[in-house]
Amino acid sequence: MNIFKKGNAAARWSRGFTLLELIIILSIIGGASAVMAMTFSEATRLTSSDVAQAIVLAQVHEAGVSIAKDVASADNITAVSPGNLCSMTCYQWSGSAFTRGTVTYTITNGNLLRNGNYIAQYIDPASTSFIKVTPTVTENNTYLLTIRAAKSLGTNKYASDNITFKFYQRMPPQLGAL
């Protein structure tokens, strides 16, 4: 019986694939899958130094944002020694009204504290400073905050980040003044 006769198209395609054809197709698909899996795993792998660098950057950012909020509402700022970063008198929300109080930022054991409450960690006190810029015509009541955070990754390895923030103190209106 000849299955390749004209007019017998159904019989011609009902044979399927040979075992050799299936093995070749499966090996091509398997090889492509292996290459794709290796590329994907390499692209998505985070090293411990990448994670540490992200943590350090987040800590420096958190410290800068916290101090920036207080500087913006302060009417008296004192830059002090590296252990006690700065002290300022500002208005704070106390739940029902604004009250005037003192806010002090200190660095203790690598932790930045605001009035004793934790703000950020891995802060390097020797490389962190808060200074008042020498007043000029265009820059009066301007402060520079340089924060360095460093996280140890083992022997002589660490992730670190430095950021310098520039703050302009907005003088709040005098309460009771017209």
Image (cartoon, grey):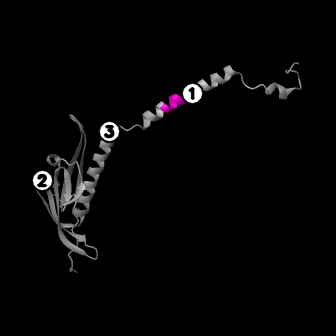
User: Residue type at mark 2?
Assistant: Gly
- Is residue 138 visible in the rendered structure shown here? no
Q: Is residue 47 above or below residue 94?
A: above
User: Residue 155's quadrant in the figure?
Assistant: top left
Picture quadrant where residue 68 is located? bottom left
In this view, 170 is above or below 151? below
C-alpha distance separating marks 2 and 1: 60 Å
Label 2: element kind: loop
Q: CA distance from mark 3 to mark 1?
A: 31 Å
Q: Are marks 2 and 3 in contact (CB under 8 Å)?
A: no
Residue at the image position 27 percent from the left and 51 percent from the top: 59
Of residues 11 and 177, the one nearer the viewer is 11
- In the image, taking residue 16 as reference, residue 82 lies left or right, namely left
Within 10 Å of disc 3 (Cα), the crowding (few <14, some 14-19, many 20+) is: few
Q: Position of residue 78 (x, y in %)?
A: 13, 61
Question: Looking at the image, is mark 2 or mark 1 nearer the viewer?
Answer: 1
Magenta residues, as a range?
32-37
Mark drawn on residue 83: 2
The residue that appears at 23% across and 63% down in the rendered structure is 70
Residue corresponding to mark 1: 30
Disc on res. 177? none
What residue sits right under mark 3 in the picture? 48
Quadrant of the image containing the N terminus: top right
Q: As rendered, which of 112 and 133 lies closer to the eye?
A: 112
Q: Is residue 92 magenta?
A: no
Under mark 1, the amino acid is Gly
Mark toward the start of the polypeptide (3 vs 1): 1
Return the residue nearer the eye: 149 or 3.
Answer: 3
How far, Cα to Cα, is label 2 from label 3? 30 Å
Q: Residue at the spot x=25%, y=55% of the render?
A: 64
